[in-house]
Amino acid sequence: MARSPLKRSRVNAPAHTPRASADVQKILDAYRARIDAARVYDVARVSALEDAPKLTQRLGNRVLFKREDQQSVYSFKLRGAYNKIAGLPEAERARGVITASAGNHAQGVALAAKKLGLTAWIVMPRTTPALKVESVRALGGKAILHGDAYDDAREHAYALAAEKGMTMVPPYDDPDVIAGQGTIARELLDQCAELDAVFVPVGGGGLLAGVAAYLKAVRPKTKVIAVEPDDSNCFAAALAAGRRVTLPQVGLFADGVAVKQIGEENFRVARHLVDDTVLVSVDEICAATQDCFYENRSLPEPAGALAVAGLKRWVAEKGVSGKTLAAIVSGANVNFDRLRHIAERAELGDATEALLAVTIPEQPGSFKRFLKLLGRRAITEFNYRYASDQAAHVFAGVRLSGGVPERESIIAALRDGGYEVLDMSGNEMAKLHVRFMVGGRAPGADDERLYRFEFPERPGALADFLNAIGGRWNISLFHYRNHGAAYGRVLCGLQVPRRERAECRRSLDELGYHYADESDNPAYRLFLGAGG
């Protein structure tokens, strides 16, 4: 299932601008009443709205963080879960509740059930990080591990609900869940009545629908900006199509918002209320995580930092200044080992580092001249590999203080100096794999094809891959990286004669792992390929 590169559209106007039609007014009135009546404060706290002085100074707008990462389960999800469960009839409560979740909703349901003295079953994919499974069990929930992905767990949860007569608690597509999340908007207006815009992370859309409905009912001048990863943009895709669509694939990094289709009720509520949508990259999310740490020493999960990344992108694109802007920091359930990856990518997200592939003459003095052209800039990374008697390849990281213009200036100076330069700062394979593998050439690896895979983190995943290959094609390169996510990243070289390439692709398609052919990637040709 090869994936073609996404065309990134950063800031997009919604397909439908906000309007005060009779139907929309009914939605606003109904949800304002639901949100005002929502029962959340038995388990939730009024989260702080904190100034972010460093970003305020840098962006020329007053920036505020709504700290939902400070809730007892380190996420806003307990609001909607509790409101839903607390409103169930006594007979349904007695039969217990069940949900499917790989993350924060699971902990919200477990906490709500514990508070109300109910039985709670949580079906989670087998790939769920141990931190989240243990958190559910610590809250008294029964964690049931099933399947490799959320969809597998969801299907099993519905089957169990029907079999046991338990009540399903949806993670987002439910009016009571939406209303619970919407209490955040009520708090925002109590804490700062003159907000110019609120930035909301979007997965299934429960938070977006609740916040948008309340803000537009009470203070319609406040803009509602939806923020999504550019590889998990189910709401933006639905707006563009004018209807809900199912994404063929979602990104893995911001797993808390990795949803293929926006909720039905969520889209009905939010589609006419959102003023703008912003798409951000993995690197921008990492940079926003770093911003949160520098502001108040917090460490949000990728989905938790999403709104901050969107705020920065929106200000840069729109040229806005002098406004009061709030970003909802939605959660902090991040696996500790993912911080390594976040730190690696944060500087790229803020354009404070450039990754450059440079071909230099294989002769005395050329390396010294290369460094002289870079000036007195800090080198963050340097990888060198002999290529031939005539040339060598350098993979270098360079610290920037002037962002993209400075990066372009460095590249121009190197090219003027006679060097061949490729900017690798936006090359996903180079950032994820090649920077750790420079020097891995294999001159005898004939017919090598390079593939990038996403492996589910479960026992047997590698064996399944090897069985699909069936001993037919030799593995000439293999590099694996995982950052505490449900999927690991694998770069694999296979020696596949030209006449067998179609058969190889069919075998990989049948395996079902998401993959991309990287054989033509310039990072591969320069640093890893069989040629010189």
Image (tube, rainbow, N blue to C red):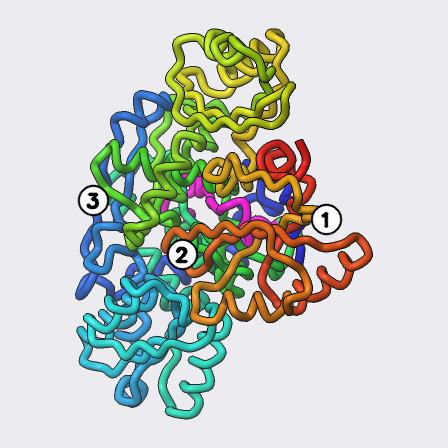
373 relative to 59 in the view: left or right: right
Q: Residue 508 shows which numbered tag?
A: none
Above or below: residue 323 compared with residue 462: above
Give the residue number, with chain letter if any, for mark 1. 447
User: Where on the picture, by quarter, is residue 177?
Assistant: bottom left
Q: Name the foreground residue: 499 vs 73.
A: 499
**Residue kind at label 3, given as amino acid type:** Ala
> Badge 3, how many Cα within 10 Å: few under 14, some, many 20+?
some
Based on the picture, tell me whether residue 234 belongs to the magenta stretch.
yes
Instruction: Please tell me whether mark 3 or mark 1 is closer to you in this view.
Output: 1
Give the residue number, with chain letter if any, for mark 3. 48
Q: Name the foreground residue: 214 vs 101.
A: 101
Percent of width and height locating residue 377: 40, 13
> Badge 1, how many Cα within 10 Å: few under 14, some, many 20+?
some
Write the residue at 66% across / 69% down: 510
Q: Quadrant of the C terminus?
A: top right
> Badge 2, how many Cα within 10 Å: few under 14, some, many 20+?
many
What range of the chain is rendered magenta? 216-239
